[in-house]
Amino acid sequence: MSVHTKEKSVFKKRIKLFTLIIFTLAIIILIMFSPVFAIKNVVVNGNISYTKNELIDKIDFQTENILFKEYFRYFDNVYRFDFYTQQRILESLPYIKKADITYSFPNTINISIIEREPVAYILKLGNNILVDDQGYLLAAIYEQDTELPWIDGIEFGEYVIGKPLEGSGREQLETVFFLFKLVKELDQFSDYKLFELIDGVDIKDVEKILFTLDDRVTVNIGDKNKLDYKIKSLKEIYFNKLKENDRGLIDFTRGRYPSYISEN
């Protein structure tokens, strides 16, 4: 083969390679700007506290070509960061514990939400604050939610709705949640259900924890030592010793054994 023939062969290969590169780039550009892959559908599930439109308004997908972004993000942190950022935006909302955003071919975004659930409300001058079991402050409300127990005596400094309670109030709140958890656990193995009767807890003094049952019996449980024994004894007294209309105080701090002081 002559030198001229070899050069001609190399030239043809370069032309083919160049043509292939141009063709590939053209396909990529076509995909990038094709309206076929622009976002047209958003599917949301798991949301309770926010509507679909409220969640969509919080994120910025616009009508960008999601196919290119989804499949090429693995080669570029910019694209990966965009999905991550949108999820973090949703998770900044007070009730949202976890948000997961995924893509479905060709033009659908799926948003899966896990929400925080309020377990009590904290009494605070001027309004009440819903809180979940991890101490996150979910919302300020002006009325009392009679389906949830109230918590009084929590010390507040600066606080932010959507963030966990900090400072000394955090320790008080954890003590209340420890009490709730123990009562629920003991209820599971008993025909007598105490937790559903708890109206609320006064935690102003962690050495003198007070709570009320069925809006008629106050319980002074003392500190959180020997709570297991105290709750078992409380259930025995409340369900087997008191009458349905009895009103009074069950006190665990006056001696070795609990005492009952009637108000009838």
Image (cartoon, grey):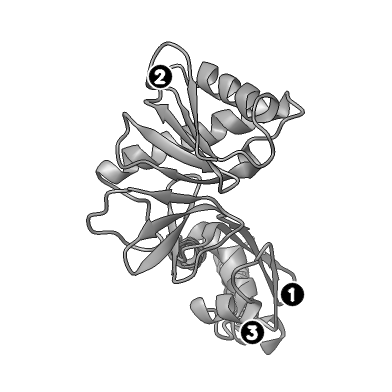
Please tell me whether mark 1 sits on a helix, a strand or a loop.
loop
Give the x, y percent position of residue 94. 46, 63
Please report the residue visible at 51 percent of the width from the left and 37 percent of the height from the top: 248
Q: Quick check: 34 above or below 71?
A: below
Could you say which is closer to the camera, residue 260 or residue 64?
A: 260
Callout 3 amino acid: Leu
Is 160 positioned to the left or the right of 80 in the image? left
Q: Nearer the viewer, mark 1 or mark 3?
A: 1
Of the numbered discs 1 and 3, the one sitting upstream in the chain is 3
The residue under the point 26% across, 53% down is 156
Instruction: Decide which of tag 2 and tag 1 comes sooner along the chain.
Output: 1
Q: Quadrant of residue 183?
A: top right
In screen coordinates, is 179 left or right of 103? left
For numbered disc 2, what is the local secondary structure?
loop
**107 left or right, relative to 264:** right
Instruction: Give the Cα separation between the discs numbered 2 and 1.
Output: 59 Å
Q: Which mark is residue 185?
A: none
Question: To which residue does mark 2 refer?
Answer: 225
Tag of residue 106: 1
Q: Is residue 205 shown to the viewer in this render?
A: yes
Q: Amino acid at mark 2?
A: Asn
Tell me whether circle 1 and circle 3 mark residues in contact (CB < 8 Å). no
* Residue bearing the label numbered 3: 30
Q: Position of residue 54 (x, y in %)?
A: 57, 79
Q: Residues within 10 Å of mark 3 (few under 14, many from 20)?
A: few
The C terminus is located in which quarter?
top right
Residue contact at pointers 3 and 2, CB within 8 angstroms: no
